[in-house]
C-alpha cells in the first residue's frame, strides 16, 4: 500500500470481475488435454518446459508480478475474506507472510540483493494493513456517507479520495538469504504519532519462529509453537529488520492514525480520548512506568499507550532521519563527476 489510492482501487473491482469472468470463459472453451499434449510432446518441447519451470520458480520477479502480489493482498483481505473482530490485543501482533528468494533477485554475491527486500516489504505491509484496517479503509473510501473523518473546523465529513502513502523505509541487513531459500516477513504495528503509523518488519528463515497462538480463529488448526521449537535467540537468525511509516489521507486532509485504529476496533476507551493533549496523543503526562509490557492478557488503554510509547523510542530515531533532507547542498561546493547509465 505504498502511496495506493484505495478509492480508485475500489472502482477497478468491477473491471477486474469482468476480466476474470472473461478469462474464465476463455479457459472453459480451450481443449486442455490437446493443448497439454501438444505442449509436452510437440516440437520445441524441451525449451517450453524449461521456460515453464523458470517462470514457476521465479514468477515473483516477472513483469507485473509485484502489482499482482499487491492487488492480491488487497483483494483477498478487503473483498474475499471475512473481517475478524480481534480487539486491542491484536494491535501490535505480527502478520506473517512467506516467500522465496527467486533467481532474478540474486546479486553477484550469490544471495538476495538488498534492493529486492523493499518489494517484499510492500507486500507484507499490504497484508498487515488490509487485514487490520479493512473496516476504516472502507469507511474512509466513502467518507461523505460514513463520516468517519470529520473536519475539526466545520464538523463536516472531509471530502476527497482515500489514500495510504508510504513516507519512508529503513532496512538493516544482518544475514544473507540464499537462492531459493524460503523466508518469512513478520510485520507489526510499532506505534503512531499525530501523523504517522510506524510498522516494524522482520525477515526470518521460514519456520525459525512460531507463534504461541493464532488470534485469527480461522488459523486454529495451524501449528503453533511446541516444546520442540525455539523460544529465543532470534537475533542470531534474523536476516534483516525494517521500519516503515504510513500516512493516511482523505483528499489533502491528514487523518490521525488513532482515528483509523479506533475505526478498526483496535483502541480501547481512554479518558480524554486518543487525540487530546498538546501533541494530540492523549495525556502524555500520565505515568505508565508500572505497566508490565510482557502482560498479554488485559489490553486496556494504559497497556496500549505504554506499548505505543515503547515503540516511539525507536520510531523517534527513525523519524529523525528526515533531517537528511536539509543536508543536501545542491553542489554549492562542487561535485566529483557525472556518469551513466545510473
Image (cartoon, grey):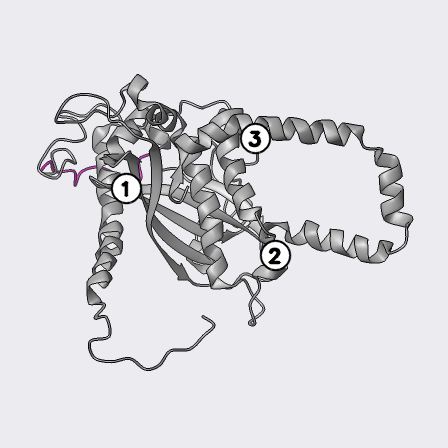
Question: Which residue corresponds to the image point at 86% horizontal and 56% vertical from the top-left?
Answer: 44
Q: Give the range drawn in magenta.
A: 285-297
* Image depth: mark 2 or mark 1 in front: 2
Quadrant including the C terminus: bottom left
Give how far across and how far down residue 245 sits, in percent. 31, 47
Disc with the residue nearer the chain's start (2 vs 3): 3
* Image depth: mark 3 or mark 1 in front: 3
Whether residue 289 is visible here, answered yes or no, is yes
Give how far across and how far down residue 94 sits, in percent. 42, 40
Give how far across and how far down residue 218 sits, in percent. 53, 26
- Which residue is identified by label 3? 16
Q: Tell which of 239 and 63 is nearer to you.
A: 63
* Magenta stretch encompasses residue 19: no
Question: Which residue corresponds to the image point at 50% horizontal and 30% vertical from the top-left?
Answer: 12
- Which residue is identified by label 2? 102
- Which residue is identified by label 1? 191
Badge 1 marks a residue whose secondary structure is strand
Dots 2, 1 in contact, CB < 8 A: no
Amino acid at each position: 500500500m505504498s502511496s495506493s489510492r484505495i478509492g480508485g482501487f475500489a472502482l477497478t473491482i468491477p473491471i477486474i470481475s469482468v476480466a476474470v469472468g472473461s478469462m474464465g470463459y476463455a479457459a472453459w472453451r480451450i481443449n486442455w488435454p490437446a493443448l497439454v499434449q501438444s505442449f509436452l510432446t510437440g516440437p520445441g518441447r524441451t525449451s517450453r518446459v524449461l521456460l515453464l519451470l523458470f517462470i514457476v520458480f521465479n514468477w515473483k520477479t516477472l513483469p507485473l508480478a509485484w502489482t499482482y502480489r499487491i492487488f492480491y493482498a488487497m483483494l483477498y483481505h478487503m473483498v474475499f475474506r471475512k473481517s475478524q473482530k480481534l480487539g486491542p490485543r491484536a494491535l501490535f501482533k505480527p502478520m506473517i507472510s512467506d516467500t522465496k528468494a527467486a533467481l532474478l533477485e540474486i546479486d553477484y554475491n550469490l544471495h538476495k540483493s538488498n534492493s529486492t527486500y523493499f518489494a517484499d516489504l510492500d507486500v507484507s505491509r499490504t497484508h498487515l494493513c488490509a487485514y487490520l484496517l479493512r473496516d476504516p479503509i472502507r469507511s474512509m473510501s466513502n467518507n461523505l456517507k460514513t463520516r468517519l473523518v470529520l473536519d475539526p473546523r466545520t464538523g463536516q465529513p472531509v471530502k476527497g479520495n482515500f489514500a495510504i502513502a508510504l513516507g519512508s523505509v529503513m532496512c538493516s541487513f544482518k544475514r544473507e538469504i540464499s537462492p531459493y531459500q524460503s523466508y518469512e516477513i513478520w510485520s507489526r504495528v510499532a506505534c503512531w504519532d499525530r501523523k504517522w503509523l510506524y510498522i516494524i518488519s522482520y525477515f526470518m528463515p521460514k519456520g525459525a519462529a512460531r507463534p504461541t497462538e493464532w488470534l485469527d480463529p480461522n488459523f486454529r488448526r495451524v501449528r503453533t509453537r511446541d516444546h520442540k521449537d525455539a523460544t529465543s535467540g532470534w537475533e542470531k537468525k534474523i536476516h534483516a529488520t525494517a521500519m516503515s511509516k504510513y500516512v493516511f489521507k482523505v483528499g489533502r486532509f491528514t487523518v490521525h492514525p488513532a482515528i483509523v485504529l479506533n475505526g478498526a476496533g483496535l483502541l480501547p476507551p481512554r479518558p480524554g480520548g486518543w487525540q487530546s493533549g498538546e501533541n494530540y496523543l492523549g495525556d502524555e503526562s500520565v505515568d505508565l512506568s508500572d505497566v508490565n509490557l510482557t502482560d498479554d492478557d488485559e489490553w486496556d488503554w494504559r497497556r496500549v499507550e505504554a506499548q505505543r510509547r515503547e515503540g516511539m523510542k525507536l520510531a523517534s530515531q527513525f523519524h529523525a532521519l528526515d533531517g537528511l533532507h536539509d543536508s543536501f547542498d545542491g553542489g554549492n561546493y562542487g561535485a566529483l563527476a557525472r556518469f551513466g547509465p545510473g
